[in-house]
Image (cartoon, grey):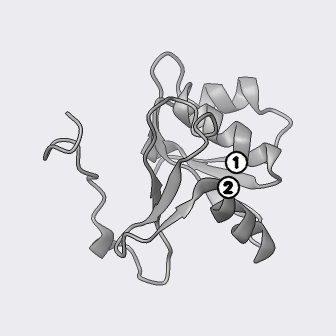
């Protein structure tokens, strides 16, 4: 259930080099681009920025690559990738941190993003 102990992010922010920025996006629908008022939150500080402003700022700073992980590779992750590619980003997807419902992420990338700047990082 939403906002219960089982809902909390299982990411141990302390296990990630502090020099690596980590953000999360909380949404109410599968497609992260469908809701107009979604915000991106910095893990650790809790600072929030409107989704579109966040990605425009990345682009303005010269960031061209993003990494996407998640559940529902064939739904949520797929739509995230699609929107990022449409906004000019190259997307890396760690296979070991992404799971599908009907299709695994490798199949999603092969079938839906064959000619797109999307890279599947092999599982460790």
Front-most of residues 123 and 103: 103
Residue most toward the front? 37
Quadrant of the snapshot with the N terminus: top left
Q: Residues within 10 Å of mark 2 (few under 14, many from 20)?
A: some
Front-most of residues 7 and 14: 7
Which mark is drawn over residue 44? none
Judge from the rendering whether residue 13 lies leftward or rightward of residue 59; answer left or right: left
Q: Position of residue 23 (x, y in %)?
A: 47, 63
* Vertical relation: 15 (above or below) 122: below
Q: Position of residue 79 (x, y in %)?
A: 63, 33
Judge from the rendering whether residue 4 lies leftward or rightward of residue 65; answer left or right: left
* Vertical relation: 75 (above or below) 88: above
In percent of the image, x 58 and y 59: which residue is there?
Answer: 50
The residue wearing badge 1 is 119
Q: How far separated are the C-alphas under marks 1 and 2?
A: 23 Å
Q: What is the number of callouts on the image?
A: 2
Residue most toward the bottom? 19
The residue wearing badge 2 is 52
Whether tag 1 and tag 2 are in contact, CB under 8 A, the answer is no
Q: Position of residue 119 (x, y in %)?
A: 70, 48
Mark 1 vs mark 2: give the one in front: 2
Q: Position of residue 56 (x, y in %)?
A: 74, 63
Q: Residues within 10 Å of mark 1 (few under 14, many from 20)?
A: some
């Amino acid at each position: 259930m939403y906002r219960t102990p089982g809902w909390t992010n299982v990411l141990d922010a302390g296990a990630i080099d502090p020099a690596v920025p980590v953000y999360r996006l909380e949404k109410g629908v599968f497609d992260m681009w469908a809701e107009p008022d979604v915000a991106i939150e910095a893990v650790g500080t809790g600072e929030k920025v409107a989704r579109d402003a966040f990605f425009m700022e990345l682009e303005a700073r010269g960031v061209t690559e993003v990494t996407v992980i998640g559940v529902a590779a064939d739904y949520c992750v797929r739509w995230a990738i699609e929107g990022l590619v449409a906004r000019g980003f190259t997307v890396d997807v760690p296979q070991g941190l992404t799971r599908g419902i009907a299709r695994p992420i490798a199949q999603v990338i092969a079938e839906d993003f064959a000619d797109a700047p999307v890279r599947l990082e092999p599982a460790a």
